[in-house]
Amino acid sequence: EMAEKQGFPHFMLKEIYEQPNAVREAIYGNAETIARIAEEIANYEKIFIVAMGTSYHAALYAKYLFQRLAKRVPIVEEASEFRYEAEELIDDKTLVIAITQSGETADTLAAIKLAKKKGAKVLSIVNVVGSMATRLSDLVVYTFAGPEIGVAATKTYTTQLTVLAMLITALARHLRTADERYLTQLEEQLTQLPSFIEEVLEYDGELKKLAEELKDRKDFFYIGRGVSVPTALEGALKLKEISYIHAEGLSAGELKHGPLALIEEGVPVVAVAPNGKLLEKMISNIKEVNARKGFIISLGDSDELSKVSDVFLKMPKIDELLSPVVYVVPLQILAYHLAVLRGNDPDKPRNLAKSVTVE
Ligand code: G6P
C-alpha cells in the first residue's frame, strides 16, 4: 500500500496532487468525441441531470453552463429523488444525464433504468470503465481520472467538471447559442486548467497552517454565488466527510435568511468569489459576515475582496464559468489537513463508503 501511495501519506492527498494530470487526461481523452456527443444531445430540450454526493455538485455546475451557454434549462435532481418523482415526466423526448464516478451507485442506476424504461435518451458521465452505468446508457463520456481510492472524491470531481465544460461548450457551438469568440476563449482556457491547478496546489503549506489555527472550530460555512454555489457545497461536503466538523454550504444570498444568525466572532466562513458578474454582491454578503466578526477566508482575484477578508487566497485569472475546476482544490486541501490534524484517516471516513450500492 505504501508503494501505491507513491510517498504520499494518504491516497486522498496523492489524488489531490494528481489533478493536473487527471484533468489533462480528461481533456485529451475526450477531444475527438465530444463534438459528436454534443450533436447527439442537441435536439433535446427536456433535460434532467441526476447524481448523488459529489457527483450531484457536478450536476449543479452543469446547470449553470447549460443556462449560460446553451440556453437550456435542465432540471437537476438527486437520483434518489428523481427515481420516485419523475416517472410521469419522462418520455422519448427526454434526455437524462447521469453523473457517477463509480457507475455503481444504487440510486443513480435506478434513475438510469427508469429513464430507459420510459424511452429517454441516457448519457452517463462515468469514471470507472465497464461499470454498470456505462452498460445501461446510450452514450458515455469518461472522465479518465484513473482509479480513486480515497472515499472522498477529488480528482473525479474536477474531471467531471472539466468534461461537462467541454461538452456544454461544444453544445453551445453546435446550437449557436453563445458568442463564438467567447466559446473559443473558454476552449483555450480549458487547456490551461492543469497549470492553473498546479498553481493553487502551492497553497498546501499555507492551508496546513490555517488548518492548525482552525482545527477546533465547531462549524464552518461555505458561501458562493451563481456558478460558485456548487463549489461552496462541495467544500462543505469535503469537510463533513473527513474532518467530522459540521459545515454548511450555501448561496451567499441565503445568508440573511437564516444562517447569519449563527455567525459570531471567529466562525470560519469560506467565500468562493471569482471575478464575475456577482462579485460585488458577494462582497456585500461578506461585509455582513465582517459585521458579526466572522472569520473570512476568501478565494478570488480582486483587491476589493482581499480587503474584506481575514485570509485571502489569490486565484489564477480564469473565466468565472471555468473557475470551479480550480477553486475547489484549496478547499479539498483544507479539509484534508483538518482531518489529519484531528486524528482522522481521510481515506476511510467513518460511516461512509466509496460507492453506495444499496438504497
Ligand atoms: C459516495 C461517495 C462519494 C460519492 C457518492 C456518489 O457517497 O462516498 O464520494 O460522491 O457516493 O458516487 P458516484 O460513484 O455515483 O459518483
Image: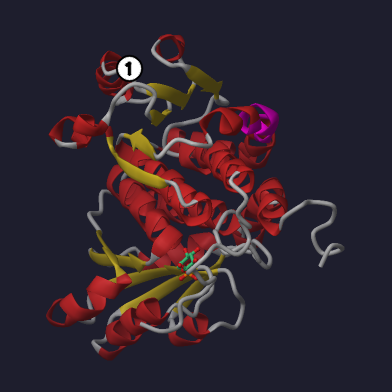
Of the 4 image quadrants, the one containing the N terminus is bottom right
* Crowding near the residue tagged with mark 1, few <14, some 14–19, many ≥20 C-alpha atoms within 10 Å: some
Element marked by disc 1: loop
Q: What residue do we see at 14% from left, 35% from top?
A: 257
**Start-end of magenta stretch:** 201-208
Q: Nearer the viewer, residue 263 or 62?
A: 263
Q: What number of labels is visible?
A: 1
User: Residue 332, image x and y in percent?
Assistant: 56, 45
Q: What residue do we see at 23% from left, 63% from top?
A: 45
Residue 90 visible (yes or no) = no
Query: Type of residue at label 1?
Result: Lys
Q: Nearer the viewer, residue 169 or 268?
A: 268
The colour mode here is secondary structure
User: Residue 309, image x and y in percent?
Assistant: 43, 16
Vertical relation: 137 (above or below) 288: below
Q: Nearer the viewer, residue 140 or 272?
A: 272
Vertical relation: 275 (above or below) 244: above
User: Residue 51, image x and y in percent?
Assistant: 37, 67
**Residue occupied by mark 1:** 293
User: Residue 86, image x and y in percent?
Assistant: 18, 76
Residue 204 shown in magenta: yes
**Quarter of the image holding residue 5?**
bottom right
Q: Nearer the viewer, residue 283 or 297?
A: 297
Residue 304 shown in magenta: no
Residue 231 visible (yes or no) = yes
**Quarter of the image holding residue 262?**
top left
Of the 4 image quadrants, the one containing the C terminus is bottom left
Q: Is residue 61 left or right of residue 162?
A: left
Q: Is residue 277 left or right of residue 33?
A: left
Q: Is residue 27 left or right of residue 95?
A: right
Q: Which secondary structure type mostly characterizes the magenta part of the structure?
A: helix
